[in-house]
């Protein structure tokens, strides 16, 4: 059978490869004969990968060191790593879930990817409503900042670190959804495709954390759409691998929602929005700082 996906011998970089969607994606890529460079804080124990690289995505120097161990030419990048915010501060969560991806794109992928390359991020339906003006005006300063140090300075100046970490997760995913659009004039004109997968609730190693963040299992399940269950990591890995494959050769700028109909029916006003409509300019007013 013809190799329709076209991953054989391609250099693929996967962040978050040790567990969940990142692990499932890595296993699929290995099966498709890709050369997989698996990045994670935790060891990646998957037979057939080209190399495991330990990295702390909250630190610029660690990212720089990791990319010294990756070939100069990268064919596909899978930005899957992330934290829920349950165990991290707002700013730490935004750094790992958004700033690291932006830094990697602008410092490395912009120079190491050629025509025909592809980038796929995993964001979230928790980043729905990214296009709302009240949200854009909060995260756009991070898009406009230049370089890692300035991004960190701007993040501090936003004065949002008193907010709970899970809100940092939603903030970062909104910024990532916007950033997928923002990158189109930069990468698409060079014939490098950029897309994102927006999963609904998925049964990964962070399930318990997301259950706490959602306010209980019932609310977590509500964001999984009409399936009546959480998705598996593999069910999210399939569309991630598709987006960076030859099968999607004319798809760029797609925010592919995988929540079994929950977001669409909410947008159509047929069902309640399972995530609620989060607007960060209002949240800043409703959750004052403890020392205020």
Image (cartoon, rainbow, N blue to C red):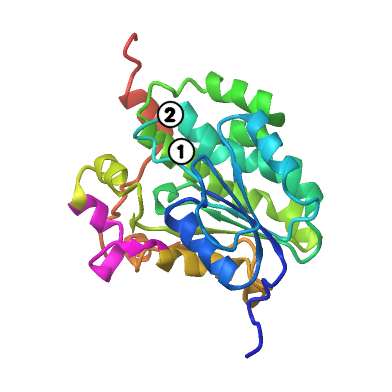
- Please tell me which residue is depicted at 37% across the width and 26% down the height of the picture: 163
Residue situated in front as seen by the camera: 173 or 25: 25
Question: Where is mark 1, residue-wise?
Answer: 171
For numbered disc 2, what is the local secondary structure?
helix
The answer to the question of whether label 2 and label 1 lie on touching residues, with beta carbons closer than 8 A, is yes
Residue 133 visible (yes or no): no
Count of numbered tags = 2
Say above or below: 222 vs 96: below
Q: Residues within 10 Å of mark 2 (few under 14, many from 20)?
A: many
Residue situated in front as seen by the camera: 71 or 193: 71
Residue situated in front as seen by the camera: 35 or 128: 35
Say above or below: 117 vs 83: below
Question: Where is mark 2, residue-wise?
Answer: 90
Q: Position of residue 262 (x, y in %)?
A: 32, 63
Which one is in front in this view, the residue at disc 2 or the one at disc 1? 2
State how far apart marks 2 and 1 are (Cα).
9 Å
Q: Where the C terminus falls, by quadrant? A: top left
Question: Nearer the N terminus, badge 2 or badge 1?
Answer: 2
- Please tell me which residue is depicted at 66% across the width and 49% down the height of the picture: 182
For numbered disc 1, what is the local secondary structure?
helix
Residue 82 visible (yes or no): yes
- Please tell me which residue is depicted at 30% across the width and 54% down the height of the picture: 273
Give the quadrant of residue 221. Answer: bottom left
Judge from the rendering whether residue 31 lies leftward or rightward of residue 129; answer left or right. Answer: right
- The part of the chain drawn in magenta is 218-233
Number of the label disc, if any, that sits on residue 7: none
Residue situated in front as seen by the camera: 247 or 48: 48
Q: Residues within 10 Å of mark 1 (few under 14, many from 20)?
A: many
Q: Position of residue 12 (x, y in %)?
A: 66, 59
């Amino acid at each position: 059978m013809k190799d329709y996906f076209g991953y054989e011998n391609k250099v693929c970089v996967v962040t978050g490869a040790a567990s969940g969607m990142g692990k499932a994606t890595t296993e699929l890529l290995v099966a498709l004969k890709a050369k997989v460079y698996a990045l994670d804080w935790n060891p990646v124990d998957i037979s057939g990968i080209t190399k495991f690289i330990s990295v702390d995505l909250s630190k610029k120097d660690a990212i720089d060191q990791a990319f010294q161990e990756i070939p100069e030419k990268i064919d596909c990048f899978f930005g899957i790593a992330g934290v829920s915010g349950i165990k991290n501060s707002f700013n730490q969560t935004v750094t790992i879930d958004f700033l690291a991806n932006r830094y990697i794109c602008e410092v490395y992928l912009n120079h190491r990817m050629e025509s025909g390359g592809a980038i796929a991020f995993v964001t979230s339906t928790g980043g729905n409503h990214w296009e709302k003006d009240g949200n854009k005006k909060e995260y756009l300063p991070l898009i406009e900042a230049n370089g890692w140090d300035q991004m960190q300075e701007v993040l501090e100046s936003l004065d949002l670190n008193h907010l709970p970490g899970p809100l940092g997760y939603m903030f970062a995913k909104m910024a990532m959804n916007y950033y997928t659009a923002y990158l189109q004039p930069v990468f698409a004109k060079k014939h490098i495709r950029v897309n994102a997968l927006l999963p609904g609730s998925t049964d990964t190693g962070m399930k318990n954390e997301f259950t706490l963040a959602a306010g209980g299992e019932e609310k977590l399940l509500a964001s999984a759409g009409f399936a009546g269950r959480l998705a598996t990591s593999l069910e999210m890995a399939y569309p991630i691998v598709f987006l960076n494959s030859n099968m999607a050769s004319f798809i760029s700028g797609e925010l592919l929602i995988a929540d079994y109909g929950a977001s669409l029916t909410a947008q159509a006003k047929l069902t309640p929005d399972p995530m609620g409509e989060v607007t960060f300019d209002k949240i800043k007013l409703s959750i004052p700082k403890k020392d205020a």
